Amino acid sequence: MIQNRKLIVIPIVHTKADFGQLGQRMNIDAEMQDMVRRYWNGVFDFVKSLPVDFSSLRVYQDGLPDTGDDDVSLVVERAQTPNYEVIRWLRDKGAHIVGTEDKDLLVRQYNLLQAVLTTDPIEDEDGYINARLEYRNETPILSQQRNVYITQRIKDTLPEGGTGILFIGLAHEVKKMLEKDMNIVEPPETLLGSSTEFLQRKIHAERS
């Protein structure tokens, strides 16, 4: 079957700034920070070189809630991260930024992470253990629910013959869920390969 919709999938890695105040509680070493910086420089160069009509491009973003256009614009304008610098550049080129995720699922996952990062393991050992167990048990379920929502959102809003770009976290499986519905395009391995593998290992180590 010939696919007449195209989706460019960009793997992303979240920085501390993506998590707001919670980001200050995350342990991200200098090596990883440098890797993330170079990674996003490469992503930005890749996006700028895309042979597409940016004015007709649909942009989907991991963590961007599916709310009204005004709320989406506010998030895009306020977020001070390398990821959103790219998003704002695309917006200024005329691309349409699409609210991508279910807000309630995002809030629930944020609250689970907040409980882990703000509970003192010394002062409240039981509370910390329970928070980590709840996070580990619920996160896979929430992640799958988010995958389903993102997938359907793209299917519903990317028009026939249209091109979209999806910035999506390494842990998500949206690409696999969309392969039968549209032509999936990814950056070359020379741009993202080794960086992605390194960052994936770091993420798994932090979650264990």
Image: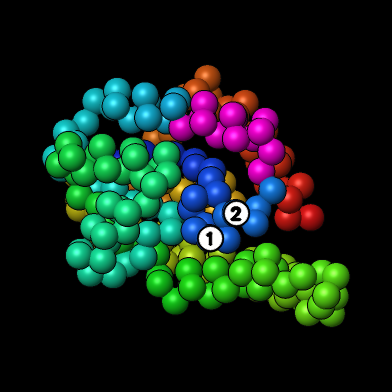
* Quarter of the image where one finds residue 121: bottom right
- How would you classify the magenta stretch by its main secondary structure? helix
Q: Position of residue 203 (x, y in %)?
A: 68, 47
* Residue 86: image tag: none
Judge from the rendering whether residue 29 lies leftward or rightward of residue 41; answer left or right: right
Answer left or right for 51 relative to 182.
left
Secondary structure under tag 1 reads: helix
Looking at the image, residue 200 lies above or below residue 46: below
- Picture residue at 21% right of the left edge, 44% below the top: 91
The quadrant of the image that shows the C terminus is bottom right
* Residue 64, visible in the rendered structure: yes
Say if mark 2 contacts mark 1, CB within 8 Å. Answer: yes
> Which residue is denoted by mark 2 in the rendering?
24
Q: How many labels does the image show?
A: 2
Instruction: Identify the secondary structure beneath mark 2.
Output: helix
- Residue under the point 34% across and 40% down: 85
Q: Which mark is residue 21?
A: 1
87 in magenta: no
Q: What stretch is highlighted in magenta?
A: 28-40
- Residue 56, above or below 123: above
* Image coordinates for residue 190, horizontal then vertical, percent: 52, 20
User: Which one is in front, 134 or 85?
Assistant: 85
Residue 104 drawn at (x, y percent)? 44, 76
Query: Which residue is at the far front?
Result: 123
- Badge 2 amino acid: Gln
Toward the top, the furthest residue is: 190
**Residue at image location 28% in from the left, 70% down from the top:** 67
x then y, percent, for residue 174: 48, 53
